[in-house]
Amino acid sequence: MIRLLGMLLLLCGGTASYATEWNVSLWGSRRAFTEHVEKLAHYVEKDSKGSFKINISYGGLASNRENLEGIAADQFEMAQFCSGYHPEKNRGVSVLELPFHGVDTLEEEQAVSFAVYQHPAVAAEMAKWNAKLLMPTPLPQYNIVGRGEAPQGLGWFEGKTLRATGGVAAALRSIGTETVNLTATETFDAMQGGIVDGASFAQHAHFSFKTIDLAEWWTANLNPGSTNCPVVVNIKAYEALSDEHRAILDAAVEPSLEHYLEYYTDLINKWSAILEMFGVERVQLPDAQIEEFRATVAAPVREAWIAQADSEGLPGAELVNLIDQTLTAYREGQTH
């Protein structure tokens, strides 16, 4: 609902001046995960001199599983969603959640995300929801916090129930874990009530959604994969922007992500101190088991994903290869 707050004909020149206001649907509260959206709103209002404003709502516009429906229904102009909450709605984006891609840094995650977002088949799939992929939310590799006896090896995971989504869940199921697809906002209660033995998240979410308050241990090196959570804009709203406002929005993406990367990297650097403050044990699983896990799981999960994507009319192998190619090109570019 783009609200045209004024259409004033200037007496000199006869041109029209528009004031545009957008709503963005997020969830939870302001945290590292939303810093790029917060910064984007700041830049847009500043650079437009107040004629383009983005209002951020944390849970007031839609649930975190229904943001794509809200975009499709023109209920708001911008939203964030996590692919793993509903891969059937965004199969193309979900390729970024496959386990053991080999992504090592937030910058690499950003590079591969943009490559996938710009693929015509992925853009077309999102367009069915009236959604344009604007920017990623680069996240580090996920690890698990839990209660009770800490795992000393991968055998611990057999028969346990963990909160996990997407490719991380697929990887854990391959070693006998039962996984539950809970949203971030549902996880604390499930862990507190003993419904799950632990939860798979990036660092910010363990902190923001308070699973760290319950945690007795954290797996420091499991690193099975990550979640991909894009920020999208309503295509009709985007195309209805004036050329000036569209240019301001597009230009704000890069500095907003730069701010996000700095903010999140600072959190990662403080993580050891945070664990110590909460009395959480760092669990280092045996390297040989991790390597075997990677070698055993990566290929079959990829092949299953490719088959599913192909059945839905997406170029599955092409998208998987795009990630590998982008990683190689990005790393080569960093060394030149």
Image (spheres, rainbow, N blue to C red):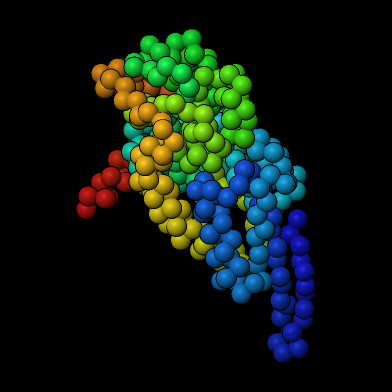
Query: Residue at the spot x=60%, y=72% of the render?
Result: 48
* Residue 310, placed above or below residue 207: above
| Outermost residue, bottom side | 12
In the drawing, does residue 289 fall left or right of residue 264?
left
* Residue 316, placed above or below residue 131: above
Query: Residue at the spot x=58%, y=50% of the render?
Result: 30
State which quadrant residue 149 falls in: top left
In the drawing, does residue 9 fall left or right of residue 245?
right
Q: Nearer the viewer, residue 137 or 121?
A: 137
- Residue 299 in sight in this render: no
* Residue 78, placed above or below residue 224: below
* Residue 256 position in % (x across, y down): 49, 58
State which quadrant residue 171 falls in: top left
| Outermost residue, left side | 336
* Residue 260 position in % (x across, y down): 46, 53
Q: On the rendered image, what quadrant is the N terminus found in? A: bottom right
Query: Residue at the spot x=50%, y=63% of the render?
Result: 251
Q: Nearer the viewer, residue 230 or 121?
A: 230
